[in-house]
Amino acid sequence: MSAAPIGRIEIPLVNPNEPEVQVIEVAVEPFTRIARGDLVCVVETSKATADVEADVAGWIGPVHVTAGERASAGDLVCEVFAERPEPGEAAPVAAAAERPAG
């Protein structure tokens, strides 16, 4: 049985006029340790670039974004677990189903 995540790292709203961003870099690998403040990914709008940092320490689960793709504010980048999840144990999340409409 898979443990519940202790945190979620999501795409931030960098510019209120642009809810969609380009993922420039993904700095984490699935199933590795991360410390609070570590760089997770870098995103960019037409006016700004932003570092997305971990706000909790733990183990990275599956990573749901890749460099070069577009993502929306609130999209799941990855979940963080207290213990190392085994590949296949932490099931992929349907991020779109979890986001409120609007």
Image (tube, rainbow, N blue to C red):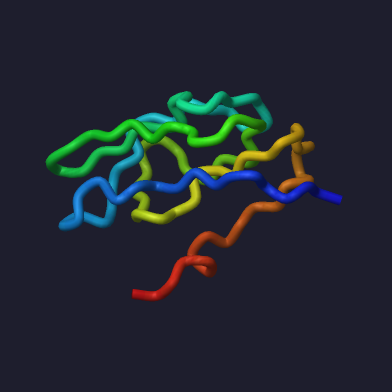
Q: Residue at x 28, y 47 (%)?
A: 21
Residue 68 or 57: which is nearer the viewer?
Answer: 57
Q: Is residue 10 left or right of residue 61?
A: left
Note whether 25 is above or below 7 in the view shown. Answer: above
Q: Residue at x 46, y 26 (%)?
A: 37
In the picture, the quarter occupied by the C terminus is: bottom left
The percent position of residue 49, horizontal first and vertical second, equals: 23, 34
The percent position of residue 79, horizontal first and vertical second, equals: 59, 44
Q: Residue at x 86, y 51 (%)?
A: 1
Q: Is residue 53 left or right of residue 97?
A: left
The percent position of residue 98, horizontal first and vertical second, equals: 53, 66
Note whether 102 is above or below 20 in the view shown. Answer: below
Q: Is residue 78 left or right of residue 42?
A: right
Question: Extreme left residue here?
Answer: 47
Quadrant position of residue 94: bottom right
Question: Extreme right residue here?
Answer: 1
